[in-house]
Image (spheres, rainbow, N blue to C red):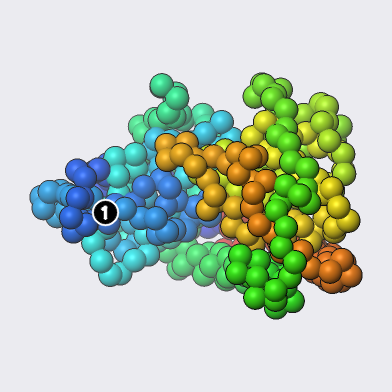
Amino acid sequence: MKEMKLPEGWKVEKLDTLFLDKFTGDWGSSDEENKGIFVIRTTNFTNNGKLNLDGVVTRCIDNKVIKRKKLQFGDIILEKSGGSDNQPVGRVIYFDKTDGIYICNNFTHVLRVNKKKAVPKYVMYFLLDVHKKGITKYFQNKTTGIRNLQMKRYLGLDIVLPPQEIQKKIVKALEKAEEILKKRKEVINLLDELVKSRFIEVFGDPVTNPKDWEVKLLGEVCDMKAGKNIKACDISEINTGTLYPCYGGNGLRGYVEKYSHEGNIPLIGRQGALCGNVNYARGRFYATEHAVVTQPKVKINNYWLYYILNELDLNRFSIGAAQPGLTIGKLNRVKIPIAPLDMQNQFADFVKQVDKLKFEMQKSLKKMENNFNSLIQRAFKGELFK
């Protein structure tokens, strides 16, 4: 760690010296009778240190393993295997459950802090900052497509330790900042719910068509064609300012040097578990072969079309189990209720006003996130509390 002047009473310790216990998780065996133990995987990790129990699985775990590896409140769970091209391995989450029995899987490592030496959540925030800075990418090796964290080197990291009273103040300040971020995200999500609610209020559920609008086949009102193939190596993760957005079956894939289409056009994903998802491309863009470009053949509001396609839940028409997909022939036969054009336009105007507000709030959220990252930096430099 680069030397810096610390406030009096602060010190630098090796990360490895702070733990009462460290151990790898366990995967156990298949839970056929659904009577097993909750097992946390890296899919339950978020990028902000929070545990997400959506989709948590159960496994059959030996009682001796449970006794040895049962998670405790305040444990830090480290992702030791996984990662991706865009995200180095080494994410951490804070285990804050007080009920139920949980362990974590063998792609993770539990770090149990000695509370006499450090405040567990302070250590978690420190390690979260380490990952956000990209430091863990220097501690990983790659085998057969999986990135593995070099644990000995990682645990040899230096950690800045103020007195525990200061650690607690830092944790409290960061928790308050996170709560503000959470509320802003909730407001943005509520704007999406507002639009959806307004659509249902005005037009009803397009699947059941309670407003009794005229019904046509999607192929009668729209021309639908799959996009064009493109090599993965031609897609950039970052837009340099001169590239065009590239959409695939699950939305934005990246950015490319040429465009295949131009306009404001709904795109339907036609391949994979999320097939049937709908995106709205604006201006010049590239659509891959896994995206269906949906252009009206009759007078219809494109924005309204995007929302009704979303509400039609097109994924229910997918075929195939191992690799679900949607054929254009299947999409052509989907029934779609057509509301009067003036009502479509009025709804689109309403959505545009909400989108303006949402855009401003997202800009504000980005600024708040930057401020939060700056707050973490200042906290560990001793600039918040001394």
Residue that badge 1 annotates: 58
The spot of residue 303 in percent (x, y) is: 81, 58
**Residue 90, above or below 122:** above
The spot of residue 266 in percent (x, y) is: 76, 49
Q: Tell me: 85 left or right of 369.
A: left
Q: Is residue 14 visible?
A: no
Q: Tell me: 190 left or right of 356.
A: left
Q: Quadrant of residue 215?
A: bottom right
> In this view of the protein, which residue sits in the foreground, 232 or 370?
232
- Count numbered badges in the picture: 1
**Residue 284, above or below 203:** above
* Residue at 49% across, 42% down: 319
* Residue at 42% across, 59% down: 54
> In this view of the protein, which residue sits in the foreground, 230 or 175?
230
Q: Residues within 10 Å of mark 1 (few under 14, many from 20)?
A: many
> In this view of the protein, which residue sits in the foreground, 286 or 171?
286
Q: Tell me: 34 left or right of 278.
A: left
**Residue 195, above or below 57:** below
* Residue at 53% across, 67% down: 175
* Residue at 28% across, 70% down: 99
Q: Tell me: 39 left or right of 371.
A: left
